[in-house]
Image: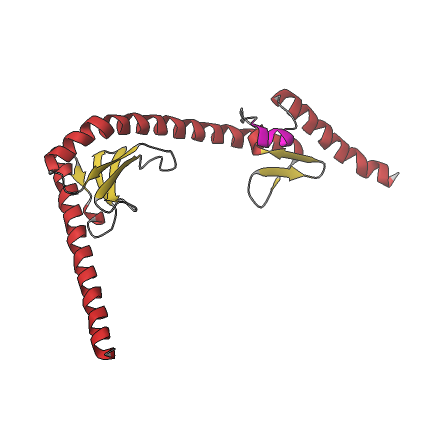
Amino acid sequence: MNTGTTSINYEAERRAREAREERQAAMLRIKVRGVARLLSGRFIDEDANRSCHTIELAPTVHLWARRDWQKKDMIHWGARCPLAPNHSAPSVCTAIDRPVAAIAADLRRRLVGAAHAACKVAMENAAQARDREHARNAQIAELEQVLGPLKQSHDHQSHYTDGFSIHRSDLAGGGYRGEYRAEVRVRSWHCLLMIARLVAEDARVAPKETQE
């Protein structure tokens, strides 16, 4: 076997593969830009040279598009809410060789409405999560008025001091799912404050007994 010929063939194959990938990437950009225009959205130019492109339909509703990881002849479209990125949203696939107008019509029928609905739910869930977090912080502050400064665990999920420990999921209506059930100590805020006052009182009494 001619080593020189083999090396040239590998190099030619690499160049051909890179050229093919560049053509496919350019085709994807063209399709996504066209779809953005037909859906009255804005193609986000910052993503133009990335493998995943973004269309802004509204400030709270984005569509993303990339080649499907398994079926390279398909475009994988999905939705995300930029203000609540951790919530799940729908996704669909379309063939990359379909006309732009057909892809846009398909997305309008299968994805756009669902994307708006999912992002609305995501925003509501994010707002509720922020409200719960504010309520928990207020409850921790109220406990600190009784117990003094509370320390946080390394994962920031628990607060504790000598003789007292409370998990954040116990506060402000935390969910009592099975995996947390063993950690739930008190389900009543009134009882929790009462226990905190007893712990604080014990802490004050103990030094006096030691001195006697």
Q: Nearer the viewer, residue 118 or 76?
A: 76
Magenta segment, which residues?
177-184
Residue projecting furthest to the right: 212
Residue at screen point 22% across, 42% down:
74
Q: In the rendering, at what x and y percent does residue 82 appear? A: 31, 37
Residue at screen point 43% across, 31% down:
130
Residue 123 as seen in the image, left or right of residue 166: left
Asked if residue 56 can be seen in this view, the reply is yes
Q: In the rendering, at what x and y percent does residue 93 appear? A: 24, 37
Asked if residue 141 can be seen in this view, the reply is no
Does the magenta run of residues contain 12? no
Location of residue 106 by image quarter: top left
Q: Is residue 67 above or below residue 102?
A: below
Q: In the rendering, at what x and y percent does residue 78 appear? A: 28, 36
Residue projecting furthest to the front: 1
Residue 18 as seen in the image, left or right of residue 34: right
Residue at screen point 22% across, 41% down:
75
Location of residue 142 by image quarter: top right
Q: Nearer the viewer, residue 151 or 93?
A: 93
